[in-house]
Image (cartoon, rainbow, N blue to C red):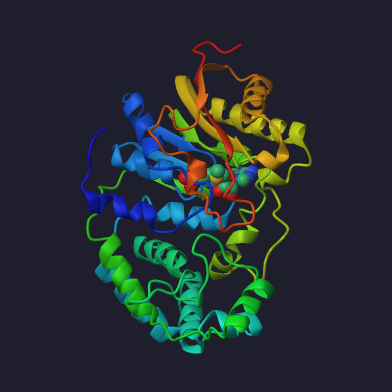
Amino acid sequence: MEAWPEDWLRLNAVCPYYTMFPLDFPLRQMAVYPEAKSVLDPFCGRGTTLFAARLAGRSAVGIDLNPVASAIARAKLTRVGPAPVVRLTRKLIKEYGCAPAPAGDFWNWAFHSRTLREIAALRTGLLDRQDTPTSVMLRALILGILHGPRNKGLPSYLSNQMPRTYASKPAYAVRFWRERDLRPVFVDPVQVITRRAERMLRGLPPRTAGEVLTGDAASTVARLKRRFDLVVTSPPYYGMRTYVPDQWLRNWFLGGPPNVPYGTAGQLATQRNQAAFVSAMAEVWRAVASRCSPGAHLVIRFGALPSVGVSPEKMLLASLREAKAGWLVRDVCPAGSASGPRRQAEQFNGKHQTMGVAVDEIDVTAELLRRRG
Ligand SMILES: C[S@@+](CC[C@H](N)C(=O)[O-])C[C@H]1O[C@@H](n2cnc3c(N)ncnc32)[C@H](O)[C@@H]1O
């Protein structure tokens, strides 16, 4: 596979996200389908497919229901240097210094009061203005540093001790800090953002055309005007219901409530049973087919948590059949065997309730029949 300057790849790690693809996987698909110029990911998560498309010089559209995902994914299509990002940070902290910050036990323990005031200023300032490439990038950078472990040297995260992949639930987190008497220390957002921006944004790949939409995959795809010739995607893993509640702190930063949103309306994972989940996936493959050129390829990585005891392969193939949209399955193989050594599930971190378990994952490739009927 083509080698890119190391600097160019850093942006892909701007913020972690559950069941994100290893970048190798969509990059490999770009190499397998060099003729594909227009790429779609209807469950784009943090935008790994879009970033791979950008590296390969293709245009890309991504869709995700979770605003945290789409905020990160948007940055993957953006090109802006560190200086404007740092300037905007300083400006927002100055202009919105009086923005209200959430109060209560969790917030008192999670952040030093001054750090929290400055985060609240950045939050309000970003919510208050029209998006520009600079604000899109700053938002994604802040999502990536909002919470994480306390390190020994210069701080990399704004919070008290926390995981970086997901936000702890408030009651658990407060107990954890209190028992260890772990008081939050002042972390200067300008300094952390400056270090991050300088590291991640010094070298970036050229921009390619594309956009990220926040919404339901099936209905949003159906409204798209353009045509695609390659779709690389990964629907929510069956049994994995925590995409939204686990990202509650990042969701707050984007304008959400200052508590854990347990209702995850529209998320595919909330379907009441396997058959309903299969039908919901089928609807997406149908909508995708309606926006694809004949001969287009659809590459899907899908998995299921072992606790739910189902075969992801059977479910996915059933959904493609149910779609009746002309998708002809060309290849089914265990995840990773076609795309390099890393499985998506290996990025799961043993510290998470539902993670650290071997997730059954497969890769399926289908081709859209040239004559649909
Ligand atoms: C397996 S993750 C995708 C990860 C992605 N490949 C990446 O590299 O980050 C599945 C995504 O589907 C999104 N999702 C769930 N239900 C959806 C729906 N009805 N419409 C659009 N996106 C949805 C979830 O928010 C989640 O981000």
Decide: is 364 above or below 221: above
Which residue lies most toward the right here?
272
Q: Residue at x 43, y 53 (%)?
A: 74
Decide: is 312 above or below 208: above
- The quadrant in which the N terminus is found is top left
Q: Along the line of sight, which residue is nearer the eye, 130 or 120? A: 120
Q: Quadrant of residue 351?
A: bottom right
Residue 147 visible in the snapshot: yes
Which residue lies most toward the front here?
180
Q: Position of residue 251 (x, y in %)?
A: 57, 64
Q: Position of residue 53 (x, y in %)?
A: 35, 39
Q: Along the line of sight, which residue is nearer the eye, 43 or 165? A: 165
Q: Is residue 372 left or right of residue 30?
A: right
Residue 44 visible in the snapshot: no
The count of marks equals: 0
Q: Position of residue 311 (x, y in %)?
A: 66, 29
Q: Residue at x 36, y 50 (%)?
A: 77
Which quadrant of the figure shows ligand 1?
A: top right
Q: Is residue 323 left or right of residue 11?
A: right
- The quadrant in which the C terminus is found is top right
Q: Position of residue 330 (x, y in %)?
A: 50, 16
Decide: is 302 above or below 67: above
Decide: is 148 above or below 12: below
Q: Quadrant of residue 318?
A: top right
